[in-house]
């Protein structure tokens, strides 16, 4: 009993442009496009998250290596500092049979000698330990 009113003029021309009847076919491509975009975005986020996690693991491993190498460097530096201490140098020189030098002499730029050179005297065995045979 409900009859569509007939349109005239401009309204009739515009009504002809609209699809007649239910249009399920027009919704299907749009729904597929939305599903594809959402699925693609989800997969992209998953890949991005995985690569960020991998980078995080690499970063933590590199930080651990840096810490280990820093500790090793500090230990080696302490060892070098121990060998460079004056008493350690004096003890090691005595072990090698070295003795303190005598009076130094200096050469001037014109070739003259300033000072009287002296010979090094062997100190008593009380101040230096005897050299070990090797």
Image (tube, rainbow, N blue to C red):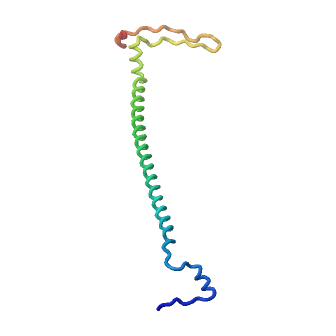
- As rendered, which of 43 and 64 lies closer to the eye? 43
Does residue 81 lie above or below 63 as drawn? above
Task: Give the x, y percent position of residue 80.
Answer: 42, 26
Q: Check the image and report above or below for 63 versus 111.
A: below
Q: Nearer the viewer, residue 82 or 133?
A: 133
Most extreme residue toward the right is 110
Q: In the picture, residue 115 is in which quadrant?
A: top right
**Residue 12 drawn at (x, y percent):** 60, 85
* Depth order, front residue of 19/122: 19
Answer with left or right where residue 66 lies relative to residue 18. Answer: left
In which quadrant is the C terminus drawn?
Answer: top left
Residue at image coords 57%, 89%: 6
Q: Residue at x 63, y 11 (%)?
A: 111
Query: Residue 7 appears in which quarter of the rendering?
Result: bottom right
Q: Nearer the viewer, residue 92 or 107?
A: 92
Q: Position of residue 24 (x, y in %)?
A: 48, 73
Q: How far from the left and from the top, in percent, is residue 46?
A: 43, 54
The vertical placement of 91 against 42, above or below, is above
Q: From the viewer's perspective, is 75 left or right of 41?
A: left
Whether residue 112 sits left or right of residue 22 in the image: it is right
Q: Residue at x 44, y 8 (%)?
A: 121
Which residue does the image show at 39% across and 39% down from the upper left?
64
């Amino acid at each position: 009993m409900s009859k569509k009113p007939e349109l005239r003029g401009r309204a009739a021309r515009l009504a002809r442009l609209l699809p007649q009847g239910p249009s399920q076919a027009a919704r299907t491509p749009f729904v597929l496009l939305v599903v594809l975009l959402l699925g693609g975005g989800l997969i992209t986020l998953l890949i991005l998250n995985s690569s960020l996690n991998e980078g995080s693991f690499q970063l933590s491993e590199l930080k651990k290596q840096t810490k280990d190498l820093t500790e090793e460097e500090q230990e080696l530096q302490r060892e070098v500092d121990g060998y460079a201490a004056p008493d350690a140098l004096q003890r090691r020189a005595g072990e090698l049979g070295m003795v303190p030098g005598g009076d130094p002499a200096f050469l001037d730029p014109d070739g003259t000698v300033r000072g009287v050179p002296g010979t090094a005297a062997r100190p008593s065995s009380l101040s230096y330990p005897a050299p070990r045979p090797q």
